[in-house]
Image (cartoon, coloured by chain):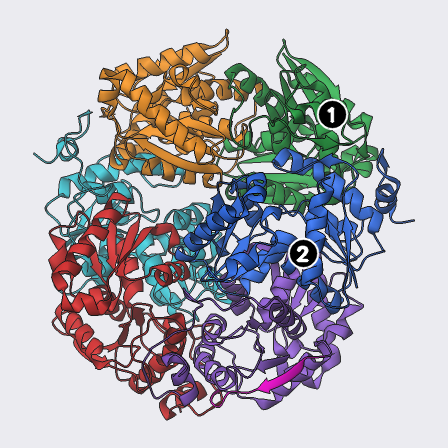
Chain colours: A blue, B purple, C red, D cyan, E orange, F green
Amino acid sequence: MRILIANANTTEAITERCAEAARGAASPGTEIVPGTPRFGPAVISSGLENAIAAHAVLDLLAEHAGAVDAVVLAVSLDTALEAARQLMPCPVVGMTEAACLTACMLGNRFGLVTFGGTESYRLLVERHGLSGRLSGLVGVDFTPQRALSDPESAVRSVAEGVAALARGGADSIVLGGAALAGMEPALRAASPVPLLDGIACGVRLAEALVALAAPKARQGPMAAVRGRDSVGLSPALATLLRGGD
Amino acid sequence: MRILIANANTTEAITERCAEAARGAASPGTEIVPGTPRFGPAVISSGLENAIAAHAVLDLLAEHAGAVDAVVLAVSLDTALEAARQLMPCPVVGMTEAACLTACMLGNRFGLVTFGGTESYRLLVERHGLSGRLSGLVGVDFTPQRALSDPESAVRSVAEGVAALARGGADSIVLGGAALAGMEPALRAASPVPLLDGIACGVRLAEALVALAAPKARQGPMAAVRGRDSVGLSPALATLLRGGD
Amino acid sequence: MRILIANANTTEAITERCAEAARGAASPGTEIVPGTPRFGPAVISSGLENAIAAHAVLDLLAEHAGAVDAVVLAVSLDTALEAARQLMPCPVVGMTEAACLTACMLGNRFGLVTFGGTESYRLLVERHGLSGRLSGLVGVDFTPQRALSDPESAVRSVAEGVAALARGGADSIVLGGAALAGMEPALRAASPVPLLDGIACGVRLAEALVALAAPKARQGPMAAVRGRDSVGLSPALATLLRGGD
Amino acid sequence: MRILIANANTTEAITERCAEAARGAASPGTEIVPGTPRFGPAVISSGLENAIAAHAVLDLLAEHAGAVDAVVLAVSLDTALEAARQLMPCPVVGMTEAACLTACMLGNRFGLVTFGGTESYRLLVERHGLSGRLSGLVGVDFTPQRALSDPESAVRSVAEGVAALARGGADSIVLGGAALAGMEPALRAASPVPLLDGIACGVRLAEALVALAAPKARQGPMAAVRGRDSVGLSPALATLLRGGD
Amino acid sequence: MRILIANANTTEAITERCAEAARGAASPGTEIVPGTPRFGPAVISSGLENAIAAHAVLDLLAEHAGAVDAVVLAVSLDTALEAARQLMPCPVVGMTEAACLTACMLGNRFGLVTFGGTESYRLLVERHGLSGRLSGLVGVDFTPQRALSDPESAVRSVAEGVAALARGGADSIVLGGAALAGMEPALRAASPVPLLDGIACGVRLAEALVALAAPKARQGPMAAVRGRDSVGLSPALATLLRGGD
Amino acid sequence: MRILIANANTTEAITERCAEAARGAASPGTEIVPGTPRFGPAVISSGLENAIAAHAVLDLLAEHAGAVDAVVLAVSLDTALEAARQLMPCPVVGMTEAACLTACMLGNRFGLVTFGGTESYRLLVERHGLSGRLSGLVGVDFTPQRALSDPESAVRSVAEGVAALARGGADSIVLGGAALAGMEPALRAASPVPLLDGIACGVRLAEALVALAAPKARQGPMAAVRGRDSVGLSPALATLLRGGD
């Protein structure tokens, strides 16, 4: 089974880190294929960049259509998730979506901890229709850069956020954002509730979807588009819009 | 890996059918352990019976605590799901919950088709916090008995319900209720969107949870209870309430 | 008029306290009948125990079916409320439900104060469909045991919670949990808004329902069940599931 | 106990009919006091008239402040309900509010049937925060006038609406509007679920509130106003705004 | 174009201040017509007074029906807004409504700052169906009187509230209440997000509605009433209820 | 005042039609500037194409940043609306957003009629937080192509949808989609409630926003981005992401 780990911004180092985490989480027979877009923001940190990156990640996915069995969007805002599902012939899972859905199976409500602002995550959970399951959000005051240079302080600060969310009624906690990827082992001992890493959850749920072998919709918003004209898009993307021929 | 397929009513034949479906859906290394409660309703068909069956299924689960790696509740109303999560040291997944969460990964909204009334499913989806993802419910006018004696008509009627849900905006459709278990292959060709069987989804998601190895909560509503006294419960259940010793 | 005050856990002393409060609140012609389940948790303090106690309280109610004019569930989580309504030929009211509905007639929003955690009350109010009327919840950091041994400190702490809820926009305040029963007189002078005791509200609303003499539903989820088989239940409960003969 | 049955429009005949219904529903010791406003619409049949009638019914209530033990608003839109609660030193219940809250104690969801349009009732139930308990609304195509001249057809049409709501999942049904008052006996035999008359429910719940003797709020939106100046209002109303002296 | 600036309480000085603000915000060709009700509360500061003032402002509007091109309700609770739309042949805009709708065009979520309690604004935004766009409310602890006598402290306190709302995720901030009218220039430099004055927004949106020239509804709740009888209302209001002749 | 009418797909003819409609609706002093993206789908008719077009319309807007006073997105799904607000130094209004907000000022609830499916509009209204104001959606079974070739039948069909929405409680009706632009005059006589054209509403609301002169946010999600690196974007867009230098 081949799973594409699709970054939505153009920083190759993040793609590599996510692919590494995916390899650690995958079943023995699963091959991890890393992918980085040809264009777009270096690091998505605003809704504006996220809107631009949607095109970029769809452009990337079109290159792999037919050559992978599933896609995990390795971007914390699950950029272009629904559009990617319409585009691709295989299952597509977002990393934060995957962590949230896994959390739903571990208890009634989940919290989410991240570096920086929480508003975009609040909206994302709302868009996934899961606000009723969300107990709270904590934004730890750390830039991803500072987290890299002072990982011990970062872990300590995240642990405080984790503890606050647990006190506030979280039955489990989603680690939001690529900068928290790989931090779960360091936090586990101190956390009174389970912590969920989006890449690990995404890989395991993608494997489950491939095993279930649900066919692609032939009708409605998730069905493949056909006969759509366009201008100035990549050949792969333009071909898929026309219907694949 | 051992997965308990836990029926919540006392009809052994239903347990067997669900265990069979689970074996068909499981990974090679997974062993399916069927379980039927010692007491309770023969077939749950009302909220009253479901409330009684909650105790019955918890009594059943207590017998297997420590001896299985995960539990799939093989009962369409996900009877006692949260209590079971608190009780057991391993992951617990409800069959309808599993189908609904899988549906969330296949598109924006899902429908649900079942035999008979739909109100209890509407409430169940609401309790799971997924009403915003539900496009509609269709109750096919068939008793489970008639479905068994005239399966071709049953398939035809369900197929009509499936078509209506797809027209109404469902990106995928949950097959609700044990009576629909095993019907997916007969419906697949006619369905314009993917169909989801609760037992198959439950087994695959349970396997994913076991692989992710999230620890049990040590605090909050999902943590194991300790030091709780009781009267007249089974030794296994009473022991777990006291804290396992 | 005979009203069953039905405890859902097996501690007789709580039943007695609730029955005493009920006698104090009832109309002259009303007889209070206390009831304690034959089995189940000593004191419900988790969702797990509440799920077990549902069967226990239904088992208790079945013994009194036909012999009482109404039931008040004397348990703060309104355990098995809907199932009890389906089971019994007479009106059934939950004590917290009763206090919340009374609060709805005293102003726009109500608060709720209790000992310990508030999450199960938040979910209960949500399940009653009354979240839009809830201004806030305060959990006073006191065990019921400590409240019994140091009642003056308990009253002082509850009074602080009451004041905080009033400042936060509560037009009235529900006293949640059996441990707060009987505390209303001691709190009244200090409270800027009315305080509602579940047992008192339950008894008065039960009397109103008996007077209104609404017939039992003959169709739908609240109608009596008929012809349902079961295994290992008490004769009274099994008989009601079969349809009363 | 004296209960004011306060009409909000100026048609005396409606006041009399509601007072008659109230006398039929009240406990032996309860005296029913009918009241009709001095000014305002003859019959409220639009939001515009309802806004004007709010002042009119408050003006009426001010005349009775201190001389009655409770108020039932005998107007199907519960006109000025919250303002009336702030104004009066005694409990105030709206007739539709009372029927809806009673319905909440008889099952999970209730329907509402009325003559003519249903939109104002939908908004009223939403304003009461009870939309989650509402299964549906049916507007029978009958003017109140035609209902009076051809009562048999009216009953037949309402019975059809009742049956439709019961099929749609209503556990009980609120009879909305003064024109349906008194029709419950004629409908009872045919209805598969209980029917709720607002005046009867209002009187019984008002009695329960008087018996519970909850004190008036001394703080917040339900507390009496003090020291408020006004121009051109009735002496009774102006005096209450100033604080009662 | 003539726009009526309709106060809903009887304090002429507030009318004048709002009219002044309206003149400052209006297009060159727009004439501002101030209006004060004949009766009602001096200053609306409770739901009770607001219910009385609804009749008063409708009485005022009826005097101007046909003589103005649009109405801005110069009262922070948008008193009688829907009834006014039904009554008048021209567009009617509420000042807080106008600020909230303008805020919707400047970002995802808006905050609201006011003097005193915030609960009535929370309810108003909910009634406008805009709660999902509201990030938070701040009530500055200042009476309008003290704000007039110590405007510098008032501006400082409001600026703190503005900063708190901006930190809490507000993309813009509505200045709620007549006492904040005119304060926008003094606050602008310090505010990190745009501030919205209800009178200015109301005048500009009223001008836009007049320009769009949408016809009055001929059917439904917004259509003019016809043939409605009443008692004791002003000739202008009674005539409009009868249908304008 | 210069207003950019920004199409989000690459079909120039649609841009021209929208610009024409905008000129008809604008104030005398307003200049309409039409704009069509350099790349992207010919006509957006799926969520997938809409996600791609978001980048395309942002690319277009970046070319005009600083050279126009406001932007109206001339695309019925308000493509990239929030990102456009973050990108541009001037107000940005979506055509469907503008029609919906205008509808909010004409009554309580609005309907929406369009050609084809309605699901994407339901989601759009939900994303705007206005679902509580939406009475219903009607999708007329007509392709935009057939509407162009047989305009009389198209008008007749839309008129039927308009009538159905008015019966269903719509106080006004939004004409959704570019294919309905310009149809309002032909429908007006037959419609019992006002009809709202997105381009006309967008132009008038954009003019109002320019007149109100609200400053751009300096903080939060609507503030301009600064110092963001990117790869392969247009010089204008890349420059704005870097902060405009």
Tell me the quadrant of the picture where the C terminus of chain C can be found: bottom left
Q: Is residue F78 left or right of residue D197?
A: right
Indicate which disc residue F60 carries.
1
Answer yes or no: do the residues labelled 1 and 2 have beta carbons within 8 Å? no
To the question of a shared chain for discs 1 and 2, the answer is: no
The amino acid beneath tag 1 is Leu
Was residue B35 drawn as part of the magenta stretch in this picture? yes
What's the distance in space between the residues labelled 1 and 2, CA to CA? 38 Å
> Which structural element holds mark 1?
helix
Callout 1: few (<14), some (14-19), or many (20+) C-alpha neighbours within 10 Å?
Answer: many
Chain designation of label 1: F
Q: Residue furthest left?
A: D245
Provide residue D79's location: percent of width, then percent of height.
Answer: 31, 43
| Residue drawn at point x = 62 percent, y = 21 percent | F203
C18 or A41, which lies in front?
A41
Provide residue C164's location: percent of width, then percent of height.
Answer: 24, 47
> Which structural element holds mark 2?
helix
Q: Quadrant of residue C197?
A: bottom left
Residue bearing mark 2: A21
Callout 2: few (<14), some (14-19), or many (20+) C-alpha neighbours within 10 Å?
Answer: some
Tell me the quadrant of the picture where the N terminus of chain C can be found: bottom left
Provide residue F171's location: percent of width, then percent of height.
Answer: 53, 36
Whether residue A73 is visible, yes or no, is: no
The amino acid beneath tag 2 is Ala
**Stretch of the chain drawn in magenta:** B29-40
